[in-house]
Amino acid sequence: MTQTVNAKAPVARARKVGTKKELIEQVKSASGDLWIDNLNSDKGLSGVSNKKLLRLQAIFTKAKERFSSREQIVDAIVAGEGRGKDSDYKKHFGDWSVPRLMDRLGAVEKAKKAADKKAAAKAAKPAKAAAKPAAAAAAKPAAAAAKPAAKPAAAKPAAKPAKKK
């Protein structure tokens, strides 16, 4: 009985790269100077799961494409949050790993994109509301001209005399 492996499984994706040692070497080469050595010296990366190694490889290649150093990643996070001049806040990110920094950067970019979209919608709403009364005012004279003249009111019948007791 042969065992088939799901193509999306981490083992199958790691096999496309080669052996686990080759995957570890690719992670190390992709990390470059972005790496902070927080590993257990006894286990190293060989004790890390294939799924985590694949994620590390993807994150480090993405980080290398966009940034050349950890400081640039931190600067992008701080600038995205609007705290570019806060040096103590920048120091706060000094011990963070690159995956954690990239996750934070993604969250900051997502929040900024949502805020920009909300501001654009808010700016468009008053302009739309201002255009609406002007269009309604222009439509009123045309509607009045199209209406036929009102019929004269019918004469009301005379009131009945009050009853005597």
Image (tube, rainbow, N blue to C red):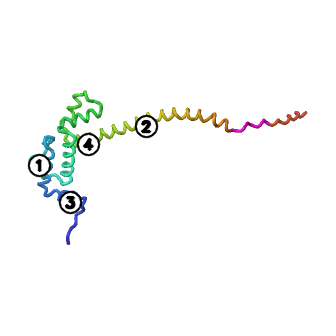
Picture residue at 49% right of the left edge, 35% below the top: 128
Mark 1 burial class by Cα count in 10 Å: few <14, some 14-19, many 20+: few
- Residue that numbered label 2 is attached to: 121
Find out whether the residues at labels 2 and 4 contact each other: C-beta distance under 8 Å: no
Q: Please say if 29 is above or below 96.
A: below
Where does the image place residue 4, in percent across and percent down from the top left? Answer: 22, 66
The answer to whether the residues at label 3 and label 4 have Cβ atoms under 8 Å apart is no
* Circle nearer the N terminus (2, 3): 3
Seen at 34% across and 39% down, the residue is 113
Mark 1 vs mark 4: in front: 4
| The residue stretch that appears in magenta | 147-153
Please give the count of numbered marks on the rendered protein. 4
State left or right for residue 119 relative to residue 86.
right
Q: Is residue 142 left or right of residue 67?
A: right
- How far apart are the alpha carbons under marks 2 and 1? 50 Å
Q: Amino acid at mark 3?
A: Ala
Along the polypeptide, which appears first: circle 2 or circle 4?
4
Structural distance between the alpha carbons of marks 3 and 1: 22 Å
Between 45 and 147, the residue placed more toward the observer is: 147
Q: CA distance from mark 2 to mark 3?
A: 45 Å
Residue under the image location 88 percent in, 33 percent down: 161
Q: Earlier in the sequence, mark 3 or mark 1?
A: 3
Q: Which is in the foreground here, disc 2 or disc 4?
A: 2
Q: Which residue is mark 3?
A: 12
Residue named by callout 1: 44
* Residue type pointed to by label 4: Asp
Label 2 SS? helix
Tag nearer the camera, 2 or 1: 2
Residue 103, numbered label = 4
What's the mark number on residue 139?
none
Q: Is residue 149 magenta?
A: yes
Q: Amino acid at mark 2?
A: Ala
